[in-house]
Image (cartoon, coloured by chain):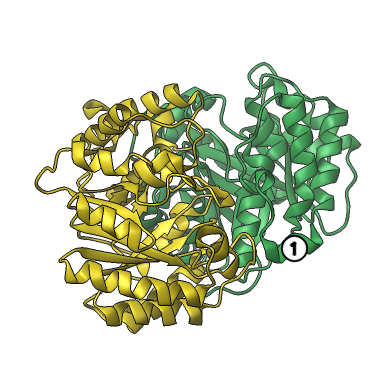
Chain colours: A green, B yellow
Amino acid sequence: MQFSGDILIEDEFLRDGLQNEERIFTLAEKLEFLAALEAAGLRRIQVGSFVHPKWVPQMADTDALCEAMPRNEGVTYTALVLNGAGLDRALAVGLGHLSISISASETHSRKNTNRSVDEGRAAITPVIERALSEGVTVRAGIQSALGCGFEGRIDPARVIAIAREFAALGVQEINIADTAGLANPVQVFDLCRKLQDAIGPDVALSLHLHDTRGLGLANMLAGLQAGVRIFDAAMGGLGGCPFVPEATGNVATEDLAFACEEMGLATGIDWQKLRAPVARAEALLGRALPARQSHVPSPPWLREVA
Amino acid sequence: MQFSGDILIEDEFLRDGLQNEERIFTLAEKLEFLAALEAAGLRRIQVGSFVHPKWVPQMADTDALCEAMPRNEGVTYTALVLNGAGLDRALAVGLGHLSISISASETHSRKNTNRSVDEGRAAITPVIERALSEGVTVRAGIQSALGCGFEGRIDPARVIAIAREFAALGVQEINIADTAGLANPVQVFDLCRKLQDAIGPDVALSLHLHDTRGLGLANMLAGLQAGVRIFDAAMGGLGGCPFVPEATGNVATEDLAFACEEMGLATGIDWQKLRAPVARAEALLGRALPARQSHVPSPPWLREVA
């Protein structure tokens, strides 16, 4: 077991992190966290989602955030889009990178978008095509791809079929989400291998993992072994899905970055710089977040730079 | 990535779990937890340690516990021994399986036993020899083998040299402990491969992992890939070392068992039966324990048997 090269971590604190919180963060607070993420070296940041404010009020100011935020060179600012109306809003604020996703679980799909999986596939195709035609870099996402808290196992053949469709549309990346944190490493390894074969070497494969059952970093390791080099995470390990009650905690950015760096992979992230914003988020939320690194001393070999 | 066969989990709730708690559990409580562990299918249980009650008062009744507990067929009852006085006590209560261990870290060794590593090696040799000559099955342990919260990295050559000495004495198993939870999967894989080569196929290798930095199950996965099939864990993820302030939380028995079963490995453990004793421990301690499985719904495919 040996790794080298670069890892890209997409931080989703501002989207998957905040969307499940009762407390609605202000635009100023979001800008503050965005700046902290950039200062720690994050190079891709999901800042929000263009969904209906009635369903996810925490994301209602995503348009305003995109207007107000800086657009620093070397940083990709991205957001989540689930339909054509969302794409209109994303294009209006000039985002050049988007996650456009559907669910592989019938129940999750109906709860999230009031559509069956096949209806979701049909509905998302023109959205992706239009985004690509507008020059947007598209990451097509498959939620609940590794298990569903409602219906259990998800047929990998269905996930692979959806991924093939996305690849045929010309998307640049396909994101596989363990939305409820139900995956195990053998499953992750197998599915990632099969997916990469199915979509070909020119489409990147990324993983979105939750740590619901403590397997977040073990699943990351399996993904690494299958060749995945892009991982979603959220500062502090905040996270969840408003329509998936079990989905607790994204893999924490600081824990994932530490793990990668220890194994010889370069993340570009100085995760020790996330201690302060995590403490700030905990103060605002009034509770401790699940990330580990932010709550234990740095390893002795890193303490001099802490 | 594919696994099959059996996994042996040694539960250390009663030793590594309780030894760090301010609250001293009664003999009756310990017997209750022991019964719960057996009822859930644990086949090897570390019930306490024969150390000086002045230093670890939580373990002062280990002799009494060994006298009072049942000795059910198919269950191995074991305890921790650090010196000859401890071995005397273990032999007096008729334990046939013992963990006899030293630390690979100078600082940890001095804090734990007031000896250098080399002094520890010299002192433990006659203890192991005597235990073996009395017919005890000996698991020789190397604490802080994968990193030390005080001095950082530990030279793997030192760990391998100690393991060779232990193997030459005729011990049945060698246990490698990540006492401070500082290991990463690449390191675990490499060291386990080298250790198994060094000690030969007739000596079992086991891993004792802490989840301090969220890598507990990722390190387990690396150990599995290196061929390890015996893992320590503690119900509820309780744990720590009184002399290693950073050492928080053993890998949780229920999380490790779930992970193994999901990957096709048989543990013999019905981890859902640990929910009740974990809730009981949390009530006694007045706080939530770090295990995940005990705090989230079972996956849909297991709910009918919950």
Residue shown at 60% from the left, 65% from the top: B107
Q: Chain of mark 1?
A: A
Quadrant of the rendered image containing residue B97:
bottom left
**Which residue is at 31% across, 80% downward?**
B199
Q: Is residue B301 above or below residue B159?
A: above
The quadrant of the picture occupied by the C terminus of chain B is top left
Measured along the vertical axis of the image, is residue A150 above or below residue A234?
above
Q: Name the foreground residue: A132 vs A247.
A: A247
Left or right of A296 in this view: A105: left
Label 1 packing within 10 angstroms: few (<14), some (14-19), many (20+): some
**x then y, percent, for residue B39:** 19, 34
Eyeballing the image, is B226 above or below A23? below
The image quarter containing residue B32 is: top left
The answer to which of A132 and B23 lies nearer the viewer is B23
| Badge 1 element | loop
The x, y position of residue B50, in whole percent, is: 35, 51
Q: Is residue B5 left or right of residue B231?
A: left
Q: How many marks?
A: 1
Q: Residue visible at 11% across and 42% down? A: B72
Tag 1 residue: A268
Say left or right for B44 vs B149: left
Residue A203 in view, yes or no: no
Q: Left or right: B298 with respect to A179?
A: left
Q: Amino acid at mark 1?
A: Gly
Q: Is residue B36 visible?
A: yes
Q: Residue furthest top?
A: A54
Q: What percent of the width, then of the height, locates residue B270?
A: 23, 38
